[in-house]
Image (cartoon, rainbow, N blue to C red):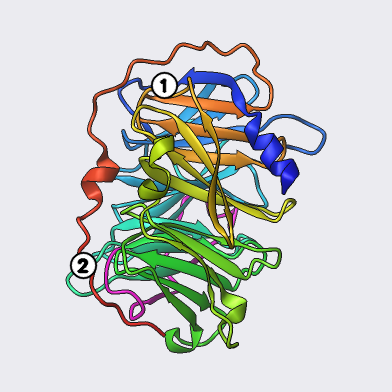
Amino acid sequence: MEALEEQLSHLHLARRCAVKDKQTYVVDIDLSKPTEGENDEKIAILCSNKSVQLYDKGTMTFIREYNGHPGVLSEVKFSHSNRLILSSACSDGTVKSWDTRVSGTDAIQIFTGYPSNAFISFDISCNDFVVCAGTEKVEEDAFLVFWDARYNSENKSARQDPLGVYAESHFDDITKVCFHPTNPSMVASGSTDGLVNVFNISKDNEDDALDSTCNSDSSVSSLGWAGKDSNQIFCLTHDEGFYWWDLAQIDTNKPITLSKIQDVREEFGTHNVDYLIGGIYHKKEDTLFLVGGSHSGNVNLLKCSNDGVKHLKTLHGGHSATIRSFYWDFGDDSLLTGGEDAQLLIWKQESQGASPLKKDSMKIASSVQQRVRVHNKKSYRTK
């Protein structure tokens, strides 16, 4: 743990690049795995102009763009086993996958939902067998939709119909879907209804599949797995709350809540933490840490423990506007960040000559903010 704190405390801006469209901002980031013996990682970013852009991590140069979605995009992910396959979900009711070796907008796979579906979250199981996407609420329904993700190269651009849906476990927008990092049958979902549900999708029906439910009493914005055995789960909320549970304690007399902060801004006001971007569990150091930001563009690194959340480091001199996305690269323990200033940055332990000057702030509206409804706290059911 001390080694990780040391690494985080010495992070400095190493490289920056302006994204291809300077009037857009970076909503999400993912990184491909390098080829064995090679340093050829690719950065994929999801942009507010409804495109997915690909960059070379080593040179930070633009490679190509995919813009075959007519609606608002949500999340971008590389395949776990095939670093060449890149996917994104869309409010038009599709999840599309592209071959990153090929330019253009033609998808190699299109996962289609039902007519009323507007996808705002998705994930891919750790063995790449299953895709799951979460929908906005339509009338009284919010769905988790599942597909068989195994790719048939002889049937390119095939449209895949759903395997089925879960329709009873959430009653508002499903804002986050997150498969377990090692168990492909376990998936967690978070919603503006305040619930974080964990499912075992190997079971025959939704009632049996629902393994546990945790209640944040707020609107879930992000979630992830933690712990040495990945039996813990954490979530962030749209009103900047943080909740961390140990699922291994559910059938015991011990409390399952490891940490709970209703508003991180009140805890770290002196460090100018205006919002939380997300969290990441560092397995080697057995440490969960959070990434927050300020509207002026600073990055805040926070360490979580049973005793609470501790501020570790503020990264200055990078962004000039709100930061919307990050990715932690375990390969070299570097941090990638993207924001509303149309900048993509890499932070490492040693600076490599990046310009210290910030880019002027882009005064543009955030489609993410526009799509998040005001949440009224109320009592929710719990399992």
Query: Looking at this view, is 179 or 96 the one in front?
Result: 179
Q: Report the predominant secondary structure element of the magenta stretch.
A: loop
Say above or below: 122 vs 338. below
Report how far apart the C-alphas of labels 1 and 2 lie in the structure. Answer: 35 Å
Report helix, strand or loop for mark 2.
loop
> Which residue type does callout 2 highlight?
Val
Could you say which disc has been placed on residue 123 in the image? none
Query: Looking at this view, is 106 or 19 the one in front?
Result: 19
Is residue 106 visible to the viewer in this orientation of the structure? yes
Residue pictured at 75% horizontal, 42% vertical:
3
Range covered by the magenta-colored residues: 147-173
Is residue 105 visible to the viewer in this orientation of the structure? no
Magenta stretch contains residue 59:
no
Say above or below: 108 vs 226. above
For the residues labelled 1 and 2, say whether their Cβ atoms are less than 8 Å apart: no
Dividing the picture into quadrants, the one containing residue 288 is bottom right
Q: Which residue is mark 1?
A: 20
Query: Looking at this view, is 240 or 151 the one in front?
Result: 240
Q: Is residue 360 left or right of residue 158?
A: left
Q: Earlier in the sequence, mark 1 or mark 2?
A: 1
The picture places residue 204, in percent across and down from the top left corner, at 51, 87
Residue pictured at 33% horizontal, 32% vertical:
295
Q: Is residue 131 left or right of residue 22?
A: right
Q: Which residue is mark 2?
A: 138
Query: Looking at this view, is 356 or 339 the one in front?
Result: 356
Report helix, strand or loop for mark 1.
loop
Say above or below: 213 vs 359. below
> Which residue type does callout 1 highlight?
Lys
The picture places residue 280, in percent across and down from the top left corner, at 57, 50
Mark 2, other Cα within 10 Å: few <14 / some 14–19 / many ≥20: some
